[in-house]
Image (cartoon, rainbow, N blue to C red):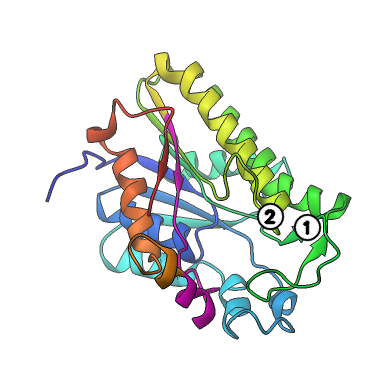
């Protein structure tokens, strides 16, 4: 196995109580990274009446990070968890303070958390997968952009400020996106907020490279983080180049690579998985 050279590094991973964030926290810890997991428990009733989601999806989104912490610590890794609402700008410096108090300065920032919702400009009540749709309005915009665009921007800014202030020469910023530059029909605010996050991350790559920081974005394929139904899986089998839904661990492997020493010359890239 190739050594990614991450032993002793410190990471902050958002949305790490389940799905890709949890898999990333575990994968980094396996390679000797101390991880601060952040998460926000969401109301399971939000999708309780939406039969397009598996019954357990709401429960997954409502869980804390205890199970992830237990997995990491059982294998000898170091991790702490903090529940925080990234829609609140005051949470950003607090998270860095908590990481520094537990492990030292944050060197790897993984912007994974999402305030996902499905909204549209059309009067449709259901999307292509049968999930409930809502109209684009101030509420849908604010919820999506607060978590998927503003929070990553503030996290990157705090990361950069502390990194430069202490004269550090090694850092990694990794974001996650979905949709693309041509838009994301039926998930329009989600796609737009993710596009904004990509732009912030590309700017970070251009501005912070001289300080030893790389900044990249991963665009996962359809990934089973608890929401995939048999209908969605059938669609993926029909149209995906690989013919299958991805696992969170497969996405985490790409994130670990981008954090690794082997990726030290990879920056300003959107890595599209298939």
Circle 1 Cα neighbour tier, 10 Å, few/some/many (<14 / 14–19 / ≥20): many
Cβ atoms at labels 1 and 2 below 8 Å apart: yes
In the image, what residue occupies the spot 61% across and 39% down? Answer: 195
191 relative to 195, above or below: below
* Outermost residue toward the left in this view: 1
Q: Circle 2 sits on which residue?
A: 185
Determine crowd level at label 2: few under 14, some 14-19, many 20+ residues with C-alpha closer than 10 A.
some
Label drawn at residue 252: none
- The answer to whether residue 78 is seen in the rendering is no
State the extent of the magenta-drawn residues as a range: 215-235
Q: Is residue 83 above or below residue 236?
A: above
Q: Is residue 238 above or below residue 261?
A: below
Nearest the eye: 210 or 273: 273
Image quadrant in which you'd find residue 89: top right
Q: Secondary structure at mark 2?
A: loop
* Residue that label 1 marks: 120
Residue 113: horizontal and vertical position, in percent?
A: 58, 53
Residue positioned 56% across, 39% down in the render: 97
Residue 271 seen by the camera: yes
Q: Residue at x 37, y 69 (%)?
A: 244
Q: Position of residue 28 (x, y in %)?
A: 33, 51
């Amino acid at each position: 196995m190739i050594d990614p050279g991450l032993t002793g590094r410190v990471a902050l991973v958002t949305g790490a109580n389940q799905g890709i964030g949890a898999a990333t926290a575990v994968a980094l810890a396996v390679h000797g990274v101390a991880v601060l997991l952040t998460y926000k428990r969401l109301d399971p009733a939000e999708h309780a009446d939406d039969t397009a989601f598996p019954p357990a999806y709401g429960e997954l989104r409502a869980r804390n990070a205890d199970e992830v912490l237990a997995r990491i610590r059982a294998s000898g890794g170091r991790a702490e968890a903090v529940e925080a609402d990234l829609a609140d700008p005051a949470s950003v410096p607090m998270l860095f303070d908590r990481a520094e108090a537990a492990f030292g300065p944050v060197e790897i920032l993984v912007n994974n958390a999402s305030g996902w919702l499905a909204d549209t400009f059309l009067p449709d009540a259901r999307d292509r997968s049968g999930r409930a749709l809502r109209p684009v309005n101030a509420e849908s915009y604010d919820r999506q952009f607060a978590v998927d665009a503003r929070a990553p921007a503030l996290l990157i800014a705090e990361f950069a400020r502390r990194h430069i202030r202490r004269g550090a020469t090694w850092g990694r910023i990794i974001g996650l996106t979905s949709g693309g530059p041509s838009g994301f029909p039926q998930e329009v605010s989600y796609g737009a907020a993710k596009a904004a996050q990509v732009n912030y991350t590309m700017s970070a790559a251009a501005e912070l490279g001289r300080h030893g920081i790389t900044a990249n974005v991963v665009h996962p394929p359809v990934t089973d983080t608890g929401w995939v139904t048999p209908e969605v899986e059938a669609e993926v089998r029909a149209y995906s180049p690989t013919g299958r839904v991805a696992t969170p661990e497969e996405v985490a492997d790409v994130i670990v690579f981008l954090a690794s020493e082997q990726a030290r010359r990879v920056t300003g890239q959107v890595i599209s998985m298939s």
